[in-house]
Amino acid sequence: MVAHAEIRVVHLSGSKINFREPVITNDSRFLLCASGESVKVYSSSSEECVHDLQGHTDLVSGIVRNPSNHLQVYSCSADGTVRLWDFTDGILIKTFIIGYPIYSIYVSENHGGVVFVVVPMANDKSSELFQLVAVHLPLSGDQEVEARELSAVLCDVSPSGAASFGRKGEYIAAVKGLQLEVFFFKKQKSHRFFLKSGNKKGAKNAFTCVSCHPKEDCIATGHEDGKIRLWRNFNQKKEYTYSTLHWHHGAVNTLQFTPEGTNLLSGGIESVLVQWHYTQENQKDFLPRLGGAITHIAVSPDGSLFCTSHSDNKITIIQSCVKVSAIIQGLVKGEGVRTDLTIDPRSKALVLNGKPGHLQFYSLHRDKLLYNLDIVQQEYIHEEGLDQFEVVKAAFDTRGDWLATVEERTQKGSELEINLKLWVYDEQTQSFMLNTTVIAPHEDQITAMCFSPSPETTMLVTISFDGHFKAWLLADHSDTKEGASWSCDFVGGYHHLKPGCCCFSADGSLLAVGFQEVVTVWSPSWELLTTLSQPPGAIRDLCFGRLSCSKYLLGTSTKNQLCCWNLLTCSLEWSTPVDVSLLQADPLSENMAAFCSQSGCSDLFVFKPGEPRPLYSQKALCTGKVQRAVFAPRDQMLESCEEHAQWLNRSQLYFFTQHMDLMTFSTKTEEDRLLASSKRLMVDDSVAVTPFYLLLGKHRQHQEALTNPMAERIQLPQGSIAIKELLYTPAHVLPSASFLCSMFVRSLLISSSSASEEKEPVEEEMESEEEDSEGEAELRDARQDLGGSAAWGPGEELGAPALTKAQERELRRVKHFDHSWLSSVLEC
Amino acid sequence: MASFKSTKIPIYPKLGEKVTPDTLYWKNYKAPVQIKEFGAVTSIDFSSLAPHNYAVTASTRIHIYGPFSTEPVKTFTRFKDTAYSGKFRSDGQLLVAGCEDSMVRLFDVSGKVALRVFKGHTKGVHVTDFTSDCYHILTGSDDYTCRLWDIPNSTELTSYKEHTDYIRCGITSKLNRDIFITGSYDHTLRMFDARVEKSVMTMDHSQPVESVLLYPSEGLLVSAGGRYVKVWDLLKGGQPLVSLKNHHKTVTCLSLSSNGQRLLSASLDRHVKIYNTTNYKVVHNFDYAASILSLALAPDDESIVVGMTNGVLSIKHRKSPEEKREMAGKQRMQPVYRIFVKGRNYVPKKDDFLVSKPVKSHLAKYDKQLKKFNISKALDTALESWRRNRKPEITVAVMKELDRRGTLKNALAGRDEQNLSQLLNFLIGNVVDPRFTPVLVTATEMILDIYQAVVGQSSVVDRQLVRLQELVEREVDYQQDLLEVLGMLDTLFAASLPRKEVILNSSPLARSDGKIM
């Protein structure tokens, strides 16, 4: 196998942004969050990503502000380094090498030069025990510094976010399991407080989070049963007290005191931000329905902004607990992509199920979530153990006018609820509107669904485990009041077998439905044309060839076979024994991609059905099975000439690995282009890089470039006056634009005298042509010019053998002029 | 912060006919006025002269009614036997009628005594009509002949004896004074030209013909006989165009709506069907109490008059536009002065800053309670009597929502006798409705689980539980019967398509399989 160095498998961003607590900068302008292997800096007002701080080689596991410099942050990562960044410029200042994987980081103003990090007890990743250690950061000018001066503070802490510094950094509180541990730095001594496991009455006392009051000696802890305890007087081992607050019905995920300590914020699975008043504990404010379960809360140092991260990969920025001001939404990845990956033909966005009951439209080119489409349209109840509706299938028709979705809800002891919904694209609102809801379209789960690609009919075929496939047609009821709606047109089946997959040919003239081991091919008039089968093994995937290979039908079976049938002869063309887990056809070319799983790894083969050799193959693409894959058409065709990279020219292949990482293939030419564009797009840091800014900024730069040479030229005084007149007189007293136009244009023209030497020939030509028909102003100038340089007259030019083109033209123009006045002057 | 999403009330497709412009048009008639005649009403004819009186032939009389009168304006009683086919002349001055005693009488509309009596037929005359030049009369009789009579001379002009059975219908051309068509019980339609001695065209209806009708253009002929209505193209020499079989008893009468776009047929099966004349699909249907013998539409479809075998004449008048408006106006609320007029005429000035008010979303009462997780109250609200009776889908939707939240059991629990009987009443009313069954079965099971301890304590609840049990048992029986019928039908269908099956399963399958293997 030839190693293709030019094609790389790359991680596409769209990683978790809710992994750790986000950080708001001192001036509340930026929000920093850990996102995979990088730290992202978002503008808190415009929601745009301003910087992507890259440098870590493993998952970033924590970010904190540098207490001594408000323009810097520390970030720690599982790669064993702590890095110091300047986030306004996006520069890596220093790298401290700790040497152990770090799981979280804490700092305090009162402990200068020290960061507290959580590392595993034994120096390997598999260890279950973690300790909190203080790391003295050496002062050194070097970029990379080894910080080996570690001193253990607390043993056995939880790896993430369950520790907090107390008033003036005097103590640190950490929770794990049923134990709260407070370590006093002065006395170098720790107190431990235990709670009973208390299983009676459903009380689950385990600690989940902790936060210390910034001004008073008070520790707030959250518990699994939804209680919040406020601990006081904990510097004695025995006489500590606590009071309990209870509102949450699920576990308290996170707690945070506001900087002044007047309020305590808490959040949990209910997705309600609760603000407790510290002094009057029975008073509380709520901010409900924020989205997914709240996982972290962060407060800006001045207390004006809160931000909450949610389980659906979202960060909400809230202004003083009243109003949601911005939402930063990442790609939502649940446990699996139940709807297949699809590409919206209109926006070219990747479409998959996102938030519960929603479809998300994710722009692959901009790495941004475009919008969520509410499919289920029901109030989501944030409660564990509820069976909710889930979007399980989604399909677009070829033009993107129609979207079909299937939602499903399984409940113990009752029937499966399925709804098929059809959405029409509304040009005015630029989004999909619900057109038809079919309640219980099938009696069992819908396994596949596809639209007919033929332009004449709008038809949808759904396939279900109940042994039927149904064709749905758009019926136009123009004679009645209601508009077009969908209705079932045909119900088909084959020997009561369970169908598993279906596929339309590229022109919509054939429908192939895989009934276990048999592939049935149907005509648009619902005649069973032929059946194909290649036992043993049920058909898993079906795919028609496209363009020049449209006479082939490909199928994969569960018993490690990839078969290719010729539809003209109704016979098997070829078959190979590979375990294809996923077969995907490129909509723009003949190419097919087959992901094969072999011994825990996935291989990729790209091939044309009509050719014996694969175009491209890559072994050991990733570990585990590839879950989903899709070909996304490129907006710009690549011009790669290497033979094995040509399949990536028209469209790009994206896939989800077992661990829900979105990956893609990138070629060398593409990377070069990206690099070039990223250089070009270096912009002012204070402003978020919006597409609008890029457009305008580029335009402005372009303008500057244009105006710069002009500035060197001498502006005509009369011209500037005319412009001024035009620009500063009120519009209503001005004469008509058509009258002013010629005057205005004339005033903008630059006289040939001052600029003729430095002008380029093309410009010159234009100018001279204009001047031929132009008025007196230039004429007069030219005359003055001539008068000034009358010394080098025609005689001299005749002698000069080589004239530049420009000079020649100048000469010709001079010749046109009336020279009679000159003679009169001479006579005088 | 997303707003609360209200409970979705599913919209169920309305059963029955769809609302089309046709149904709206044909439903726009008032309740029928019924007049009892002495015998079966065999013929109704509208005068073409305003105010469009109409002649109703029943038993031995012909009554002439005004457009809005329920009492006859005029009555002709000088018949010795049953009268047939009272017809107005196109100028509305003369009326002709046949009689069982084989005489044809011509009346002046203002007079009482017959102006002319045409004798010549030997049996009862069922068909009479004026020709388009107004000077002749066409008659058709049970003696198998049809004749033309001259009015001024009161003499017989011609007689055609081509039919071999009773002539029961006929029509004269409105464009040509010499052409007329007759239909007979010998299953044929014959077209005659008075200038020629024999019939010029013969069409076979293959049923005894009861009624014929010419389109205003007279290119198409419609005939009714047996259960069939047939349309013939006269310009193509009597080629059959369409054969409609929408009635299940003999079609007795045909009529065209005033614009010629709709064809009406009345039948002994008590229905009047309205067809679209472009595609001949039934667009509307009227039901009557008895078998219909005659049907006529007033000009501009102002009224539909139907005569039945039991002697009842039913007249439906079109609703006038004012009445329609009145109906609509009653439903609309009067605008409140404060709300609708205040600030309405205010024109924003130049410097005014327009503040747009956020749209306040209105939530139903049960939604407000659901938002606050007051589940029992929400169920109570949904079970309020008007909602329960008029919009059971709301109640069911709320129950479904509670079930989705996993709190339906809590909401159903803790009810007193009155509340519980209310709930059971609702279940008895709706549990067998296929739209609601999936939700209500769960709710019923929960109720039985919760309240099984108190069974026997209240007679009201016990009675309802027994009723519920009976209902469920009956439903189970129905389902069983239906499944049996389904099985029978399946065998019938399977038996009707054996050849196709064989082709599908044997030849292509075997061939392809053979190649693959």
Image: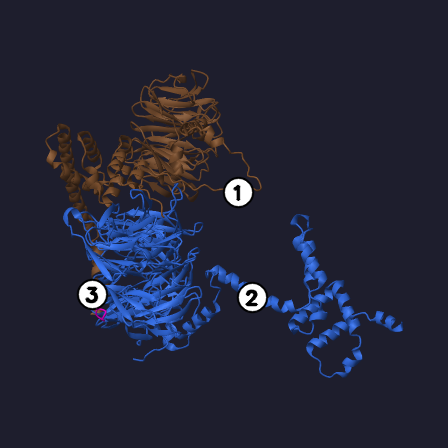
- Residue A779, quarter of the rendered image: bottom right
Q: Is residue B100 above or below residue A735?
A: above
Magenta stretch containing residue A126, yes or no?
A: yes
Residue extent of the magenta highlight = A121-130
Residue at 45%, 19% (x, y): give it.
B109
User: Can you give x and y, in whole percent of width and height, for residue B503 in the image?
Assistant: 22, 59
Looking at the rendered structure, the kind of residue marked 2 is His
Quadrant assignment for the C terminus of chain B: bottom left
Mark 1: give few (<14), some (14-19) or many (20+) Cα within 10 Å: few
Chain on which label 2 sits: A
Chain on which label 1 sits: B
Chain on which label 3 sits: A
Q: Can you tell which chain is drawn blue?
A: A
Image mark count: 3
Q: Nearer the viewer, residue B163 or A411?
A: A411
Q: Is residue B456 left or right of residue A270?
A: left
Residue to which mark 3 is pinned:
A128
Label placed on residue A702: 2
Mark 3: give few (<14), some (14-19) or many (20+) Cα within 10 Å: few
Q: Colour of chain B?
A: brown
Tell me, yes or no, whether dots 3 and 2 are on the same chain: yes
Residue to which mark 1 is pinned:
B353
SS for dot 2: helix
**Alpha-carbon distance for marks 1 and 3?**
63 Å
